[in-house]
Image: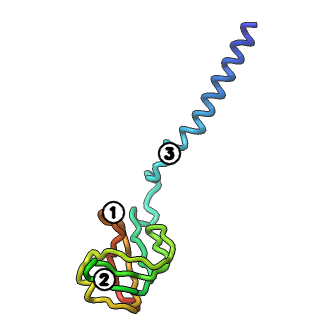
Amino acid sequence: MLNLVVEKTMRRTFALAFALTTLVAPAAFADGSHAGHGDHGASATAPASLSDGQIKKVDKAAGKITVAHGPLQNLGMPGMTMAFAVRDAGWLDRFKVGDKVRFLVEMVNGAYTIVQIDPAG
């Protein structure tokens, strides 16, 4: 009888240890650092790609440019028309409605902000 109780306790202990190992161990290795894997030719922080867009409105008073754009890959944002703050107020004079542009948007101080913008070739 004692052997049966010990065997059941050991099974439960083993099952609990197995469950914890399969749930907790992967998280310990999921930091994404890839330490020790060597350099595969990519930088640690890949540059964000520029998106295509067309200027729909330039609002100098608000300091914003409205752009009809394709997907913003770095933000996971689908294509749409949206007003963005600008990092450089000089861009409000440089670009006009109808201009086709390549640009990069990042979250700056809680606002989607154009941090790079160039005329589209």
Disc ID at residue 3: none
State the residue position of label 3.
29
| 1 vs 2, front mark | 2
Residue ID at (73%, 10%): 3
Under circle 2, the secondary element is: strand
State the residue position of label 2.
59
Instruction: Please provide percent x and percent y for residue 68.
Output: 45, 82
Under circle 3, the secondary element is: loop
Q: CA distance from mark 1 to mark 3?
A: 32 Å
Q: Earlier in the sequence, mark 1 or mark 2?
A: 2
Query: In this view, which residue lies farthest toward the top?
Result: 1
Q: CA distance from mark 2 to mark 3?
A: 48 Å
Instruction: Please provide percent x and percent y for residue 79.
Output: 50, 77
**Amino acid of disc 2:** Asp
Decide if residue 107 is on the left or right side of residue 68.
left
Q: Earlier in the sequence, mark 1 or mark 3?
A: 3
Residue ID at (26%, 83%): 60
Residue 12: quarter of image: top right
Characterize the local packing of mark 1: few (<14), some (14-19) or many (20 or more) Cα atoms within 10 angstroms.
few
